[in-house]
Amino acid sequence: MEDIHISGFKDCYIQPTVDFVESTGECAISGESFMEETAKFYWPLVEWVKEYGKKHNKIVFTFSLTYYNTSTSKWLLAILKELREMENEGGEVTVIWHYTPDDTDMNDDIMDYMVDTGLHINMVPFDEP
């Protein structure tokens, strides 16, 4: 299993930065995500999380997205469901989501993700460490 490091960039679409490190169990998605082919981008990430959960029992997953589109939100939910599966199997899962307090849409999304998955998500405003 290899680490995943993808540099985010802005071009004709926006791609987030991704850092998944197997040895530490620290994973992060940050930036903005509104590319056209979200399945092509996110499917390998979902599969990585699934495989990681088969080999390890502890993960810290941090989301620091300032914006994402509807098709991205479906893939974020897929990642969260894999994390919940890991937790259901006895794994220690920590999810941290950095957000802007006045972004009510993002706040609602995070709350919906908690309800949909049953995972606790630690909501941390962007200005806090």
Image (cartoon, helix red, strand yellow):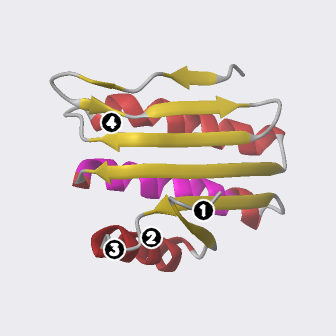
| Residue hosting label 1 | 128
- Which one is closest to the eye, mark 2 or mark 4? 2
The amino acid type, in three-letter code, at marker 1 is Glu
Mark nearer the viewer, 3 or 4 = 3
Residue ID for mark 4: 39
Residue identified by numbered label 2:
110
Element at label 2: helix
Q: Is residue 35 left or right of residue 125?
A: left
Quadrant of image for the N terminus: top right
Instruction: Identify the mark nearer the N-term, 3 or 4.
Output: 4
What is the residue that sits farthest to the left in this orientation?
12
Q: Sequence order check: which comes first, mark 4 or mark 1?
A: 4
| Mark 4 closeness class: few <14, some 14–19, many ≥20 residues within 10 Å | some
Earlier in the chain: of badge 2 and badge 3, it is: 3
Q: CA distance from mark 2 to mark 3?
A: 13 Å
| Main SS class of the magenta portion in the image | helix
Cα separation between marks 4 and 1: 32 Å
**Occupied quadrant, residue 89:** bottom right
Kind of residue indicated by mark 3: Asp
In the image, which residues are magenta?
Answer: 71-85
Q: Position of residue 84 (x, y in %)?
A: 64, 63
Which residue corresponds to the image point at 74% horizontal and 59% vertical from the top-left? Answer: 93
Residue 2 location in percent, x, y? 69, 19
- Number of the label disc, if any, that sits on residue 26: none
Residue 79 lies within the magenta run: yes
Q: Amino acid at mark 2?
A: Ile
Q: Residue at x 32, y 48 (%)?
A: 72
- Name the residue carrying label 3: 102
